Amino acid sequence: QTLVWNKKTGKPVYNAIVWQDRRTSDYCESLSTDELCQTISDKTGLLLDPYFSATKVRWILDNVEGARAQADAGELAFGTVDTYLLWHLTGGQEHRTDATNASRTMLFNIHTQQWDQELLDLFGIPESMLPQVMDSADEFGSTSEDIFGAPIRVCGIAGDQQAALVGHACFEQGMAKSTYGTGCFLMLNTGEKALTSENRLLTTVAYRLNGKPTYAIEGSIFMAGATMQWIVEGLKLLSHAGESESLVKDVPLDHGVFLVPSFTGLGAPYWDPNARGAILGLTRDSGISTIVAAALQSVGYQTKDLQKAMERDGLRPSVLRVDGGMVKNNWVLTFLSNILGATVERPTVTETTSLGVAYLAGLQTGIYESTEQLAKMWTCDRRFEPTMSADERNDLYAKWQHCVAQVRLSSNDCQQQ
């Protein structure tokens, strides 16, 4: 999320803009030259897309009355949610973030580990708005005494997905995790090298410890748990998502219905902001259980898209550690293992984002001695192994790809009319 607030009052000048918000799609399109896209990719590891903070900050400065003048006068601060919370927890004393959150703004050079002046100039964002970038385990400051009755050191900050990677103890090159929350985020540790994807995946900072960054390749899916939220709240097919597992247990995997949940466009590896959602293959035999199964399977198919992109980059993960609300569903993980043709491991502790930040704070305060110690603490609750034949897997995935192609074609045709 992107927040801009007044440094004196601490009050936002506008509502937080969430990562799924696509209001700057047209602006991104207007900037989208091959040269500029390459420059952004080379510096930040990201693609030019509304998903990231830079264009959202510009939108606020251009559309909120007086914001541009206040920013130019040094009166406004920008930050992702971590920065905003730290600011308020420390009584406005600390305006800081860590390298992982900075790397998602489209303003941070992941190679120099500095804010990039060329990008700041491009988006018209004064450097005075930006937080100081720290290690992921660091001394970020102390909370105001009046909040908890005594000051408490803040010693760990990390982006959502990077924190989950740490929580999964994916400290070795080649280890991968996938988080199934609102969206789905597959991240693979690439070690000391910031590898460039040739298949529209993101290069990002996995974590930074003792001034040394570790990098990762990431694929982002916009709709995972949010698809089930739509099933429950939008279509009202279920009273709650937890009903889905028992409902679909007898539905055959090749039931012929596909739900492409591109409600806010498609993320990696397509990055198509114009794509819109669709349900394809409906017949008179299709019912609630079929549509719910297609919604759950869409998460697996989209993860397969990311796996295929990583394969083309020479980075195929053979074991995937998973977390997030959806991983409680054994049917989902069974299908995920089958469609990936890979081992899927669910940890004992599935709240790995919180766990990862706790690990980082523990490293900074000396509770934990090393990442090697943390790796030994990871435990598996259940391991899912593929049983589907390669022919069946390939057939299902080919049908999914055909549906995605149809959705993209029809959506972009509608945009042009």
Image: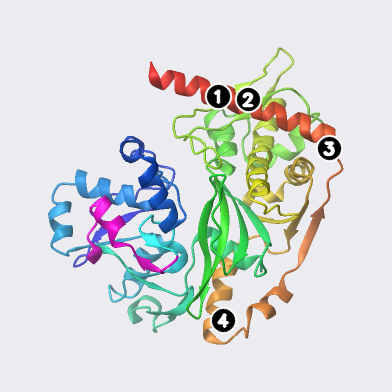
Distance from Cα at disc 4 to Cα at disc 1? 47 Å
Is residue 136 magenta-colored?
no
Distance from Cα at disc 1 to Cα at disc 2? 6 Å
Magenta residue span: 111-128
In percent of the image, x 27 and y 51: which residue is there?
Answer: 123
Foreground disc of the pair 3, 4:
3
Q: Nearer the viewer, residue 300 or 115?
A: 115
In percent of the image, x 56 and y 47: which residue is there?
Answer: 198
Foreground disc of the pair 4, 1:
1
Instruction: State the residue position of label 4.
Output: 363
Q: Can you tell which quarter of the image residue 153 is in?
A: bottom left
Mark 4 and mark 1 lie on one chain; the one further toward the N terminus is 4
Secondary structure state at the residue bearing disc 3? helix
Distance from Cα at disc 2 to Cα at disc 4? 46 Å
Q: Report the amino acid beneath label 3.
A: Ala
Is residue 115 magenta-colored?
yes
